Image: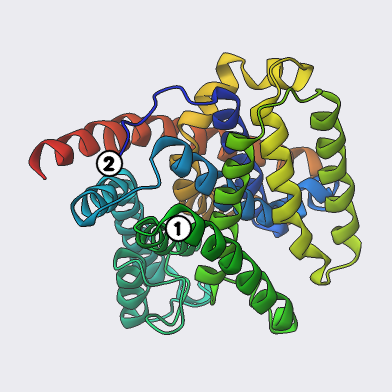
Amino acid sequence: MIKKVIKQYIPQLDALRGLAAILVMFYHYDINYLPSFLSDFFLIRQGWIFVDFFFVLSGFVIVYNYSFQFNKKTLFKFIKLRFIRIYPLLFFSVIVFAFFIIVLFNFSPDNLRYFTTKESIINGALEPLLLVNSTPFLGNSQGINDPTWSISAEFISYFIFAIISLLNIKSRNWITLILVFLSYFFLYIFFDKGLYITGDYGFVRGIGGFNLGVLVFILYDNLKIKISEIYVYIFAILIIICLNFINVNHDNFTLIFPFIFSFFIFFIAKSKDSLIISFLLTKPLQYLGKISFSIYLNHKIVFLVMTKAIFMFLPKEKSQTLLFIVFLLCSSVVLIYSNYTYKIIELRFSKYLKSKI
């Protein structure tokens, strides 16, 4: 049977999700409009890697909130609940994105890289709405709103998780381990083709990270030991050091990050007392975690529209201070906008769907 969703599982993980969403958001800000001291900052330039953090954390949280044992009836219920959770905002963000792209296309088609025809815009909207834009077998683009490929990858991971959960405990644990190995072996072999960095085979990246999160939970659930807070600091520093390293050396060393994230999540979940935990439990970061999904799906269109609108009226020579002010303004609008989409789309509309489905 499916367990009831736990309202407050491990609150510090919510804040980590919010911080990861902010770093991904900063990464997608047009580098041409960033002041140099930010465009060269490794935490911003390598923000894309935190998509893997989402995958690992998602696997951990899903197993934490649901039992492993499914039957055909509860499997369908699980998929339905996950669909209701992610699809309303996904649908809304894609439609909004398509609308503004059409407006921008009619206004200045030269400013758009990929979606230069109305047919490509329609196709770019349909693929994320059908949740197929993380695989080249069912789609041929990352979708009109780039981050949506990871939502497709995650939903595929939900299906695989639910099907594996029909098996007995020993079988599903081994299959989970094999999936992690095969996923990262594939990404390692084809790393030179850019399959890890892009969303073309994003479903493989999603399956690997999600099932790695499942393994982290199994370890978390079976090791009834107290963890020293020193490990939280060690892995936080390790993440920063490794991020700085790949800023210089873009090779398959990048594949180590999902595993570092896994250990970090494990130690954060096990640790109760540390300055990092206290920081993560502050109200602003807790709320940032709540609206993280909205931040993730909203930021691209806000940045695209605002930067084009603002810099259209500014002189060609722009000071670093001016660029920084615009960056702060755009980021603030993302947070404000996401606050409303969280309350209206994520909460109210999802609640409406639950009452109807």
What is the x, y in percent for residue 265?
A: 67, 38
Q: Is residue 326 visible?
A: no
Q: Position of residue 227 (x, y in %)?
A: 76, 25
* Contact between labelled residues 1 and 2, with CB atoms less than 8 Å apart: no
Q: Secondary structure at mark 1?
A: helix
Sequence-wise, the earlier of marks 2 and 1 is: 2
Q: Residues within 10 Å of mark 1 (few under 14, many from 20)?
A: many
Q: Can you tell which mark lies on residue 299?
A: none
225 w.r.t. 350: above or below? above
Is 113 displayed left or right of 53 in the figure?
Answer: left
User: What percent of the width, then of the height, locates residue 94?
Assistant: 34, 58
Please name the amino acid that badge 1 sits on: Glu
- Spatial CA distance of label 2 from label 1 is 22 Å
**Residue 228 at x, y percent in the picture:** 81, 23
Say which residue appears at 36% left-offset and 56% top-offset. 162
Which numbered dot is residue 154? 1
Q: How many marks?
A: 2
343 horizontally vs 52: left or right: left
Callout 2 amino acid = Met
- Residue 208 in sight from this viewpoint: yes
- The residue that appears at 54% across and 28% down in the rendered structure is 288
Q: Is label 2 in a helix, a strand or a loop?
A: loop
- The structure residue drawn at horizontal position 23% and vertical position 31%, both measured from the top left corner, is 348
Mark drawn on residue 1? 2
Residue in the picture at 75% in, 64% down: 255
Q: Nearer the viewer, residue 232 or 120?
A: 232
The quadrant of the image that shows the N terminus is top left
